[in-house]
Amino acid sequence: MRKRDVDHDSEEDFADFYRTARDGCLRAVYAACGDRALAEDLTGEAFARAYASWGKVSRHPAPRAWVVRTALNTHVSWWRRRRREVAWDEALDPAQDAQPGERLDAQVTAALRALPRRQREVVALRIFLDLDTGTTARALGIAPGTVTAHLSRATAALRESLAPNREQEPVS
Amino acid sequence: MIDQQDQQLYDEVGTAFADVRLERDATDVIRRGRTLRRRRKAVPALAAAGVLAFSLSLAAVTVQTHPSSRTTLVNVNVDEAAFSVHTNATTGVMTITIRDFHDENLLKQTLADAGIPAVFHSEKVTVVEVNGGERVYGQCNWVGATELTVEVATYSFHAGVTIFTLYPSRMPHGSVLAFNYTTQSDGKRLASAQLFASTPTGCVV
């Protein structure tokens, strides 16, 4: 009844955004929160909220950062309720964390999980969304200098954690 | 400035996540987004708790037909311990004040007297906090009717009392308000209302 053409256009616009941004956002949220199932819940809910406010989010300078930030701030129950046939304690089983065909490098995930939360978030935005310092700072609501400091510390910690891994690789 | 060694490190971490994909379809996300939009426009609200159950029944019903509405509306002024319903005789706007969750049948009858079809469902849900997230079990969804997106009410919450401001003239003919009285396991209470094109057949978990 109301603004059907506009709604249709915005829906297609959002769907395009979703298709191009969903994997990167999920990876960033997964890297930041360390729980595969929770990351999917949070990311799905954040995208739904982005759609609900698409008029605003589409004009945001970094919509993907908006989604990740929203995901990390969201306490979500919706997607879990949709899958209520799965016992919640079963869903939390770390053995079921990864999806079929998905093999995460245990050393990489361990190195990420060892980082403090804020450092993990900065790294996630830098690596998976390729955000610059200023955009990362705005997305996380912290000063650019703090982003630089977190990234520097996180990079050093990751290098140290992953160094043995890289030393085993053949040198060409 | 990111040096080459740092970039190689980031690439290594990024590659570890290369197989992580969000398989959820866009239509699912959009459907959920539409629901969020509707809720924002509708009438979710926190309801009151702990009211002394003395019954003060002051019912004065005045009949007046609103020509602008497709539904025959009746002005109602009712005060009960659990709720109050008052119609502004000039504007036709109805104020529904919910102080407690009992007497829902009486509220249903009062609204029916005013020309507002309504259904009620009370539920108890369990809220579990997990990994910084919140999961709710036992919440029901209305079935058997199409939800409408017409904005028919706003709400406010003051000192433990929820006040719905309802615009009955905006309700399409035959539409029904569905109220949910939700009591969480932590004792919090949540009242919400949705508008449906017809009477839902039930609320299922």
Image (spheres, grey):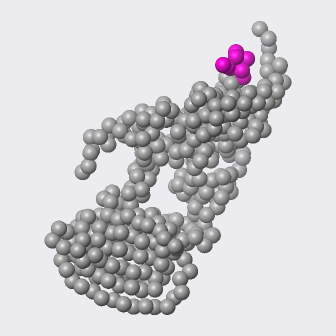
User: Number of callouts in the render?
Assistant: 0
Q: Percent x, y for residue B183?
A: 55, 72
Camera-side residue of A35 and A85:
A35
Is A28 colored magenta in this rendering? no
Camera sees residue A113: yes
Q: Is residue B4 magenta?
A: yes
Quick check: A147 above or below B150?
above
How far across and down, in percent of the image, does residue B23 sit? 53, 39
- Pick the residue in front: B113 or B124: B113
Is B40 located above or below residue B181 in the figure?
above
Q: What's the residue at 64%, 61% (across, down)?
A: B128
Chain part drawn in magenta: B1-9
Residue A99 shows in the view:
no
Q: Main secondary structure of the magenta part?
A: helix
In the drawing, does residue A93 fall left or right of residue B23? right
Q: Residue at x 17, y 68 (%)?
A: B68
Which residue reaches farthest top? A172
Q: Is residue B108 left or right of residue B2?
A: left
> Residue at left 54%, top 57%?
A81
